[in-house]
Amino acid sequence: QRVKKILSDMKSLEKEVNRLKLQAATKTTESLEEDIKQINGINVIVKKVPIDNPAALRDLADKYKDKIKSGVVVLGSINGSKVMLIAVVTKDLTDRYHAGNIIKQVAEIAGGSGGGRPDMAQAGGSKPEKLNAALDQAVELIANS
């Protein structure tokens, strides 16, 4: 009984930690104007964020997408020795930018692979030291599309 209670408490605490991490990361969306770049007349956010699980990274990318209304969002995060990446393109721009193609090329730099739909794609990588270079590549891809 005691072990079950400890495990239950631990799971509750893990959920609370994840909720607080997402809440802290979401706070950064409030000062969003400084993160938005204009590239070819498109709102673009390319950013390294302190998120450690794929679901929270998706949630944060959706929050950024909702804030910019029209544009491209590419987020990267490091979790231990792994890299997590996500690209989100608003529906009005999927004929011009394909999230799956963006994330595939960006992930290669971070030692991984990934893919997805035209409006959302995720990837992982094994080279956290290359995350900044991968995010720089995302900016280049968007600028040259």
Image (tube, grey):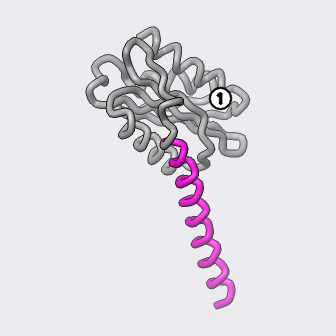
The reply, left or right, for residue 130 in relation to residue 141 is right
Looking at the image, which residue sits at the far top? Answer: 144
Q: Main secondary structure of the magenta part?
A: helix
The reply, left or right, for residue 117 in relation to residue 84 is left
Q: Quadrant of the N terminus?
A: bottom right
Q: How many labels, in total?
A: 1
| Residue positioned 40% across, 12% down in the render | 40
| Residue positioned 49% across, 25% down in the render | 104
Please provide percent x and percent y for residue 135.
Answer: 58, 24
Label 1 sits on what residue type? Leu
- Residue 115 placement: quadrant: top left
Residue sitting nearer the eye, 29 or 90: 29
The reply, left or right, for residue 127 in relation to residue 100 is right
- Residue 111 placement: quadrant: top right
Q: Quadrant of the C terminus?
A: top left
| Residue positioned 60% across, 30% down in the render | 112
Residue sitting nearer the eye, 87 or 35: 35
How packed mark 1 is, by other alpha carbons closer than 10 Å (few <14, some 14-19, many 20 or more), is: many
In magenta stretch: residue 3: yes
| Residue positioned 52% across, 18% down in the render | 139
Please provide percent x and percent y for residue 106.
Answer: 55, 23
To which residue does mark 1 refer?
Answer: 131
Residue sitting nearer the eye, 100 or 27: 27
In magenta stretch: residue 94: no
First to last magenta residue range: 1-29
Give above or below for 126 relative to 14: above
Please provide percent x and percent y for residue 109.
Answer: 62, 22
Looking at the image, which residue sits at the far bottom? Answer: 1
Mark 1 secondary-structure assignment? helix
Give above or below for 54 relative to 1: above
